[in-house]
Image (tube, rainbow, N blue to C red):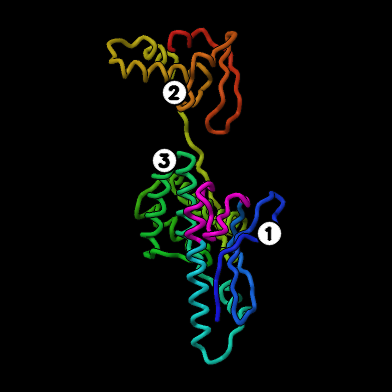
Amino acid sequence: MSSIKAVLRKKANSQKLYPIALRIIKDRKATFIYIGQYIKQIDWDNKNCAVKKSHPDFLYINQLILNKKSEVNKKLIDAEMEINYQSVTAIKSKVLNKKNEDFFLISNYYLNQLKKRKQFHQVDIEKQRLQVFKNFIKKDTFSLGDFDLRLMKGFENHLSTKRKLAKRTIANYMITIRTILNIAISDFSIKNVSYPFGRGKYQIRFPESVKIGLTIEEIKILENIKDLTMAQQYALNAWLLSFYFAGIRVSDVLFLKWKDFLDNRLHYRMGKNKKLVSLKIPNKSKGYS
């Protein structure tokens, strides 16, 4: 007789988070398989053996628990059907030594994290890149242990020759793959990831970009252009504000408020890295608010 149950173990880590494990009981002997997820004690539902909705990743972690339970259950059924006796420790060893962690399962977790941060445009971009990679390997699942230098070189060649992508765009595709592999290692403690990046392996290289600025005459033409629609005028004003404030990102310009302007200075927090910035208000910018 055997049973499987998801439990929250009682020993917390240094962040005061508790590990989720599957408790396997066979022939009155128990062992535990950890699924690589840690949560607060308050986020665990003891009655239903699941993560509560109060946790931001409850859907994903609960699905992970179900997947792991299904996998372990199959091993238990196989053990019951075999003539030779298999202990609970042997079953645990089979589960832990599997080599089929799926790259696209981790990629779904990555996309969900972007959605939670409301980076919806980035989600669309990353989805498209992952679909291109899936089409290249012609598989719906791909083991984290199957990445190697040859695969990355082949994918790079595919992006360059078949899809005619620029070197910078190709680098962005590789960054997506590297990010997901890093998540598999850091967030899920998956040990059998074949990591193809780094020294002596595939190195992501960024080509130097050529930036050509506008001339003073061209800026003056923009400042004095007439007969624009209201939408065009707003767009031009935003661009000129960015220009005169030393190249503030347009995304930051769009979120500026009157209260950000104080004592002849602009005080704002950068959207990209949350850094606080203070800039003197140039006279040229005062007509474009």
Examine the rendered structure and indicate whether residue 81 appears above or below residue 118.
below
Question: Helix or strand or loop: what does disc 3 sit on?
Answer: helix
Type of amino acid under label 3: Phe
Residue that numbered label 2 is attached to: 254
- In the rendered image, which residue does mark 1 sit on? 10
Q: Type of residue at label 1?
A: Lys
x, y percent for residue 87: 61, 83
Label 2–label 1 contact, CB within 8 A: no
**How packed is label 3: few (under 14 Cα within 10 Å), some, or many (20 or more)?**
some
Dot 2 or dot 3, earlier in sequence: 3
The residue under label 2 is which amino acid type? Answer: Leu
Asked if residue 190 shows in the view, the reply is no
- For residue 144, above or below residue 272: below
Q: Earlier in the sequence, mark 3 or mark 1?
A: 1
Q: Where's residue 70, x and y in %?
A: 48, 70
Q: Residues within 10 Å of mark 1 (few under 14, many from 20)?
A: few
Per the image, label 1 sits on a secondary structure element best described as: loop
